[in-house]
Amino acid sequence: MTNIGIALAVIGAACAALFAGIGSAKGVGLVGEAAAGVVSVDPSKFSKVLVLQLLPGTQGLYGLLISILMLSRIGIFGGNPAELTLSQGIMFLAAALPIAIVGLFSGIAQGRAAAAGVGITAKKPEHNGKAIIMAAMVETYAILAFLISILLIYNIAI
Amino acid sequence: MGSTTSYASAVAAVKAMESALLNYSDMEQLISAATDTEFNAIISARRGSDASAGSELADAWEVVHGYAPDCRELEMLLYKYDFHNLKAALKAMIADCEPEPYYIRPTNLDLGELSPILKAKDYDLLPLYLRETAEKAYQLLTDTLDGQLADSFIDTATLTVLQDSAEKSGNEFLKNYARITAVCADIKTAYRCARMNKPRSFLEIAIAGSADLDKEALIRAALTGTDGLFNFLDTTIYGEKARLLESSTAAFEKWCDDEVMEIARSARLQAFGFEPLAAYYIAARAEQKNLRIIRVCKECGADRETITERLRLLYV
């Protein structure tokens, strides 16, 4: 059963990086599309729209961090994997789910909000800050999920 | 996320270009401009050095279509010009003259190919929405040699095809656009026919009908004269606005254009989809019309109040 435990933990680590990464990729891609449209008309707005494009990228980083923390915690990096029971493996998998799921959906949602914000920057560049704030609000939920995933990972007894 | 985030790039580009559209303050300055040089300077100042910012309607279309070349919905906005060009090509063919001076751009059609296709009666080479109308209009024109009848037939077909296409698309923006376009055209046609005592046979060809204005009821009302027509329209939501025709055709036409602009304005808040692109094109069209109105009115020596009254609603 120890193999299954470690396998579940590794699946959890993979999910954290995978789904949060997908969310970020979709979000950043969408904002990139919108940003390219604005820059094609007015290249001077590149720096302003770039900030908006970066916003949905954070979910992918959170997922990556959770994945690294989890792999470190279960000893994969040291080449000496911990012996995990089935229930411990399930707990690690569950610990990855907040950032995996919230990262996926918040990345996409933040991408939509930021892409809409690109429209604000395009029409009224002086209100760029408001567009950033509105898109950044979505980040709150990704941060909450990130924190919960960290707390869970460090509080699972091995 | 496909359909709900479509045309993100095109919409963002169009939003950037919206800042180059003329606003009410610019229109006021244009009305006050003393010379053509001053007039053009005001437009250049607003548009900056970017020549792509809708200096002509065809340019505006090229820009919008360039950002969303695969957008079939946008093409519906040009049906009016496509059918006009069909009319021009058919009449030029009958009159044995060059159609080029009568063509309107932008259009979905390859105008170089239009005349040869019609001459060869190779209607299958035309876009699907134009084929049946082209064939029937040619038949009607050659059978009757009545240009006005053929015109009316094609105008009606424009409205019918537009409404059918909008209905098939299922898009509310397009359905509203098609509805108001058909309603305005039908009211104007019915009014003119009522004034000219046109027979039922003509009205049946000239009136398209729509969900808001039943074709048969409108024809019956138009046959009773202008009073009967307005009495009928009073039973619809268009009664008050239709009565503008009694005092001024220009006032009614302004209302029609403003209604279309209200539909376009409904897309201003959208961050995705083809609607903001369509709205930008409609805005550019209204801007061109306003510039034409100001120029013509100034040339005719119209006063400021008259010009302002006739100006169409703006997008920005």
Image (cartoon, coloured by chain):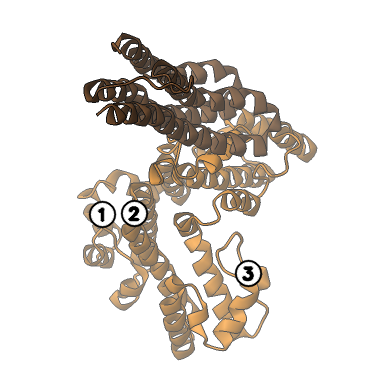
Q: How far across and how far down the image is residue A3, in percent?
A: 31, 30
Q: How far across and how far down the image is residue B79, in percent?
A: 48, 63
Front position in the image: B166 or B84? B166
Residue located 77% across and 37% down the image? B35
Checking the image for residue B131, the label placed there is none
Q: Secondary structure at mark 2?
A: helix
Please name the residue that numbered disc 2 is placed on. Answer: B179
Q: Earlier in the sequence, mark 2 or mark 1?
A: 2
Q: CA gap, disc 1 to disc 3? A: 33 Å
Chain B shade in the render: orange
Q: Chain of mark 2?
A: B
Q: CA gap, disc 2 to disc 1? A: 8 Å
Please name the residue that numbered disc 3 is placed on. Answer: B102
Left or right position of A35 against A83: right
Could you tell me which quadrant the N terminus of chain B lies in? top left
Please name the residue that numbered disc 1 is placed on. Answer: B212
Left or right position of B129 against B314: left
Residue B315 in view: no
Residue B185, compared with residue A56, is above or below; it is: below
Q: Earlier in the sequence, mark 1 or mark 3?
A: 3
Residue located 51% across and 45% down the image? B277
| Dot 3 amino acid type | Tyr
On the same chain, marks 1 and 3? The answer is yes
Residue A53 in view: yes
